[in-house]
Image (cartoon, rainbow, N blue to C red):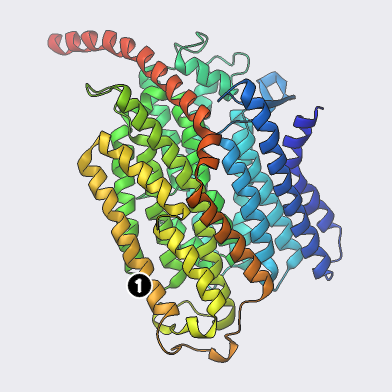
């Protein structure tokens, strides 16, 4: 095994090894269990930084390609391989997962029961997330996708709030439905290809869809692509989440403990966008082109609906949850703004589409930082006063000035204030949407005003004012060093990404350019097949 192979495998399975070690510990050794779990997440995050360095060297030789490939036989008789790799699309999300998992582990000091079981499930969840982002075999991708389901179900159902069972079951059912749809699409590809060599290989399937290979060209017909894309999109849109399959999210967020809310918003929602980019787009380029208007339309509706829903909330955590629905709508718009089949498709259109994809990718990373920060700050005050009623707060700026300052910075990042991480992705997406449809771009841009409305109103009700209005005022104590460190790290990243976004754009630019090029090629190769079928259909209609 080479050093890069070891690095990829270690990033995925180190948390599971630590979970196994914790399983052998005495459940009463809470401090040791916490230390082991946190140390493993720190080491995993450091390994993602080493992966970044290794990728930089490999990418210089093969710009935009999937590099650092690791492949081993798994179920060879069915062409299933343990196949891993990384490119400029997956790498930012791998680093984000390492960062958020580390900070969420630090935030897990607030967990006050069944620590052994909690941290075992927490670390298994991190393994599942890393596996999804690094998998290059469709079957392996699906396995890791499903691996995340049970840990999250139990983390919400055991350590959650008063309605934890309801929220956990709802999360399980929605995610399971999405997984079943993905499984159907995967079987369509597998059996449609006649179980040829590497039929689960995402790289080979993408090459076949783009027309650079002929082995699967008959299977990847335009009609099949549309059907497969719809199945994949619904499965990934549930996780994103997009309107109207978002309803599991507010309940899951409200009932989940603070560290799990951080992971849910910071990483798990990004799995939906990543699945669209990594699987649905390259494997179904014609289907993606047909659905472009639907993607943009659903994204616009998600932005406006999520913002209005957030304005209507009195629960602090539910407000932040609906803000995620709104912000992830920008991701859908950025991915969908290509009019490749229209008369207006030019080189300029191609550049704006590339801007949209890169804006969507940046939005996922930025939202991962800001949303994790917002949920953490809600959790800090909830641990003290044990309520989230926005109408029963007030005056926290005077009682907790350091906490309030950090919270304001993170909430402004979520608002999209220039100079902070939330601004860059949103403005790139809106600019790219203008080329696609100016009316939809204007509606999407108006979401920024609504976002400012609900965030500023929340800040006013919670942190400003002369006095605190709710219960447990005597328990309001200054933020402690552990909480301060977690919030400060998130704020530093929010500022850093806002001031120097090139660190992410430079990472992804070659891979996104390759993606758009192969999708254009795949669409152009599919158009003649559609044109040949249309005269036959018209003749049949005339005969009838």
Residue under label 1, please give it: 457
Q: Establish if 141 lies above or below 385.
A: above
Q: Residue at x 58, y 66 (%)?
A: 258
Seen from the viewer's position, the closer of residues 348 and 106 is 348
Whether residue 443 sits left or right of residue 162 in the image: it is: left
Q: Establish if 207 lies above or below 332.
A: above
Give the x, y percent position of residue 129: 62, 45
Seen from the viewer's position, the closer of residues 110 and 73 is 110
Give the x, y percent position of residue 248: 45, 56
Q: Residue at x 36, y 46 (%)?
A: 427
Q: Residue at x 31, y 41 (%)?
A: 431
Q: Residue at x 41, y 44 (%)?
A: 331
Query: Which quadrant would the N terminus be assigned to in this image?
Result: top right
Whether residue 169 sits left or right of residue 118 in the image: it is: left
Give the x, y percent position of residue 425: 42, 46
Q: Is residue 184 visible?
A: no
Q: Is residue 370 visible?
A: yes
| Neighbours of disc 1 within 10 Å: few (<14), some (14-19), many (20+) | few
Give the x, y percent position of residue 287: 37, 26
Whether residue 116 sits left or right of residue 284 in the image: it is: right
Q: Secondary structure at mark 1?
A: helix
Seen from the viewer's position, the closer of residues 309 and 453 is 453
Whether residue 458 sits left or right of residue 366 in the image: it is: left
Seen from the viewer's position, the closer of residues 341 and 517 is 517
Query: Which quadrant would the C terminus be assigned to in this image?
Result: top left
Looking at the rendered structure, the number of numbered marks drawn on it comes to 1
């Amino acid at each position: 095994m080479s050093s890069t192979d070891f690095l990829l495998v270690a990033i995925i399975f180190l948390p599971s090894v630590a979970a196994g070690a914790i399983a052998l510990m005495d459940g009463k050794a809470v401090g040791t269990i916490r230390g082991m779990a946190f140390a493993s997440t720190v080491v995993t995050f450091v390994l993602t930084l080493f992966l970044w360095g290794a990728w930089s060297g490999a990418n210089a030789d093969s710009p935009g390609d999937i590099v650092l490939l690791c492949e081993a036989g798994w179920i060879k008789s069915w062409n299933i391989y343990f196949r891993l790799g990384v490119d400029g699309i997956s790498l930012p999300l791998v680093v984000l997962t390492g960062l958020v998992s580390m900070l969420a582990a630090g935030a897990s000091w607030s967990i006050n029961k069944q620590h052994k079981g909690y941290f075992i499930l927490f670390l298994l969840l991190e393994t599942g997330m890393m596996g999804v982002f690094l998998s290059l075999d469709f079957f392996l991708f699906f396995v890791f996708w499903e691996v995340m389901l049970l840990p999250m179900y139990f983390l919400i159902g055991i350590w959650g709030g008063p309605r934890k069972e309801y929220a956990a079951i709802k999360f399980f059912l929605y995610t399971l439905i999405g997984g079943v749809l993905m499984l159907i699409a995967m079987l369509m590809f597998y059996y449609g290809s006649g179980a040829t060599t590497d039929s689960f290989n995402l790289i080979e399937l993408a090459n076949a869809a783009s027309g650079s290979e002929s082995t699967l060209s008959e299977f990847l017909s335009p009609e099949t692509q549309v059907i497969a894309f719809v199945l994949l999109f619904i499965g990934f849109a549930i996780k994103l989440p997009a309107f109207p399959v978002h309803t599991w999210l507010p309940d899951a967020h409200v009932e989940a403990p603070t560290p799990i809310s951080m992971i849910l918003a910071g990483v798990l929602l990004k799995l939906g966008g990543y699945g669209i980019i990594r699987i649905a787009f390259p494997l179904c380029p014609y289907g993606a082109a047909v659905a472009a208007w639907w993607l943009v339309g659903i994204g616009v509706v998600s932005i406006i609906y999520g913002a209005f829903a957030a304005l209507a909330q009195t629960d602090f955590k539910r407000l932040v949850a609906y803000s995620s629905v709104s912000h992830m709508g920008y991701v859908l718009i950025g991915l969908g703004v290509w009019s490749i089949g229209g008369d207006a498709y030019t080189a300029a259109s191609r550049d704006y589409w590339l801007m949209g994809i890169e804006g969507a990718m940046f939005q996922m990373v930025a939202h991962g930082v800001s949303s994790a920060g917002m949920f953490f700050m809600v959790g800090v005050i909830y641990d003290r006063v044990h309520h989230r009623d926005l109408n029963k707060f007030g005056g926290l700026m005077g009682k907790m000035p350091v906490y309030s300052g950090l919270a304001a910075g993170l909430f402004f990042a979520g608002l999209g204030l220039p100079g902070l991480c939330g601004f860059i992705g949103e403005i790139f997406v809106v600019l790219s949407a203008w080329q696609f449809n100016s009316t939809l771009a204007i509606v999407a841009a108006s979401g920024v005003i609504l976002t400012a409305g609900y965030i500023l109103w929340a800040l006013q009700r919670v942190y400003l004012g002369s006095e605190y209005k709710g219960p447990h005022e005597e328990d309001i104590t200054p933020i402690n060093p552990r909480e301060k460190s977690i919030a400060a790290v998130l704020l530093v990243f929010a500022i850093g990404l806002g001031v120097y976004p090139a660190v992410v754009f430079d990472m992804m630019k070659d891979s996104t350019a390759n993606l758009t090029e192969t999708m254009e090629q795949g669409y152009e190769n599919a158009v003649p097949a559609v044109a040949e079928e249309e005269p036959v259909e018209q003749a049949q209609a005339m005969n009838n």
